[in-house]
Amino acid sequence: MAHVELADVSKVYDDAQGTETAVDSVSISVADGEFLTIVGPSGCGKSTTLRMLAGLEPVTEGVVVIDGREVQHLVPSERNVAMVFQNFALYTKMTARENIGYGLKHSTQLSRPERQDRIEEMAQLLGISDHLDDKPAELSGGQKQRVALGRALVRQPDVFLLDEPLSNLDAKLRSEMRTELQRIHDQLGVTTIYVTHDQKEAMTMSDRIAVMNDGRVQQIATAESAYDRPANEFVGTFLGNPSMNTTEVTIERRDGTATLRTAAGNVLTTVPAETVPTGVSRATVGIRPEDLELRSADDGSAKVAVTEFQGNTNYVHLTVEDKSLTARLTTDQTFERDEQVALAIDAPDLYLFDTETGETLKTRDRATHTDGGRS
Ligand code: ADP
Ligand code: MG
C-alpha cells in the first residue's frame, strides 16, 4: 500500500502529426488505501496519466511519487504497480492458475508452494477457486475478468491501476463487477486508481473522483460534492444524467430582485437579488433536471416535446425558444406532448457560471449536504 502523488505532470506527444499536449500539468494526490476514479470524456488524457504512473509512458515534465519515492525515471517493474486494461489478454494455452501465477514466477523469489498458496488465496477472494484448472476458453467473461484481476493483484502491488476494465462487459456483468471491485478493494485496502469515461460508474464507485477535460484536472472531490458544487460548468454538466440544463441569461437588478432573461428577452425567472453575486450582469444559468418544476399554463414559456416514462421517474423534455431542457418528475406529474408549461425555478436550486471562463459563480444550495471536500 502506498500514498501516490502526481505533481505537475505533463505529457506532450511530438510526432509527424505535430505536437499535442495530452496531459497538462496534472496534480493528483491519492491517500494510502484510497479508491480514486479519474473520469472524463474520451481523449481527455486519462490513459496517458495512468500509463505515466505505471511507467509505461515517460513523463515530459513533473514528478511521480509512490510511497515517498520519486519513480518517474524507474521502469515499471521497479515501481510495484499493477495495471489492468480494457483489452486484457489472458494466455489462452495456460490455465487460470498458470495465468494468475505467471507474474509471480518471474517477479518474486517465492517457492513453488508459496506461489500456489498465494494463487489459491487470490482465487478464493475472487470467487474462482473452482475454475483454477480451466483454460480461458472454458471461462465466462466475468471469470476471465477475475483471472485478469487476480494476475495483477497476486503480486501484492503497492498501487492498483485499472483502465476502463469493465468496458467490454455487458451491463449486468459490469454492475456486478463494480460491486466486486469495491469489495476486493475493501478487503485488500490497496491504493486504487480507476479510469472510466462513464460518469455514473465514477460516481458510484469511489471515495473521490478526479474529473479531467482536455488534459487538465478540473476538480477533485467526493462525487456528491462535485455534483452539488462543481468547480465549473464542465464538471456541472458532465456529472449527472440527464445533464444539467444550461442557458445564457442577462441579469437585471431592481428593488431587491434579480430578473434573469433569455437571449430572446423573455423572463426565465426572478430571484432575490442576493442570489446573484454582485457585479454579474451576464451568466450561464444551470438547473438540474430534478430541480426544474413545471406547471400547466397556456401562456407558459416552454412546450413539451417528448415525455419519457421510466417506471419510477418521468422525464419531460421541453423546448424553450430554440433550447431543449429536461425535467425529472415523479410519475404522478404528467404532461401531454405539445402542452404549454411554465417553468418554476427556485433561487436555491440555481447554478450560475461565468459565460466566458465557465467558472462557477454560484452553486445550488443544499443545506443538508455537508460533506465538504472540494480541492
Ligand atoms: P483517454 O484515455 O482519456 O481517452 P488518452 O490518454 O488515451 O485519452 O489520450 C489523450 C490524448 O493524447 C488524445 O488526444 C490522444 O489522441 C493523444 N495520444 C494518446 N496516445 C498517443 C500517442 N502514443 N501518440 C500521440 N498522441 C497520443
Ligand atoms: Mg483511455
Image: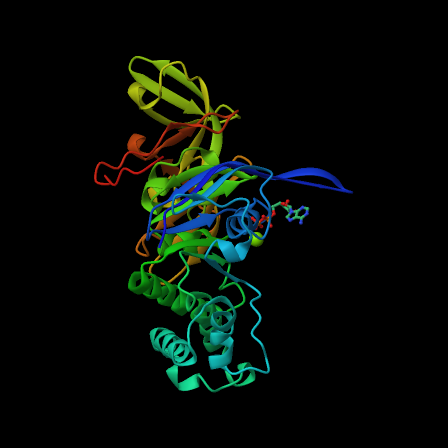
Q: Is residue 134 above or below residue 171?
A: below
Say if residue 299 shows up in the picture. no
Vertical position of residue 237 compared to residue 166: above or below:
above
Q: Is 35 on the left-hand or right-hand side of 303?
A: left
Q: In the figure, residue 149 lies in which quadrant?
A: bottom left
Which residue sits furthest left? 368
Quadrant in which the N terminus is drawn = bottom left
Numbered marks: total: 0
Residue 139 location in percent, x, y?
50, 82
Please say if 45 is above or below 100. above
Tell me the residue at 38%/37% (across/down). Answer: 343
> What residue appears at the point 56 percent right and 83 percent down from the top-left corner?
137
Q: How is the image coloured?
A: rainbow
Give the residue at x 56% y 44%.
44
Quadrant location of the C terminus in the rendered image: top left
Q: Nearer the viewer, residue 329 or 195?
A: 195
Q: Is residue 48 left or right of residue 14?
A: left
Which corner quadrant of the image does residue 115 belong to? Answer: bottom left
Image point (38%, 21%), residue name = 259
Give the x, y percent position of residue 2.
Answer: 36, 51
| x then y, percent, for residue 105 | 49, 73
From the viewer's side, name the closer residue of 46 and 357: 46
Confirm whether residue 40 shows in the render. yes
253 relative to 170 in the view: left or right: left
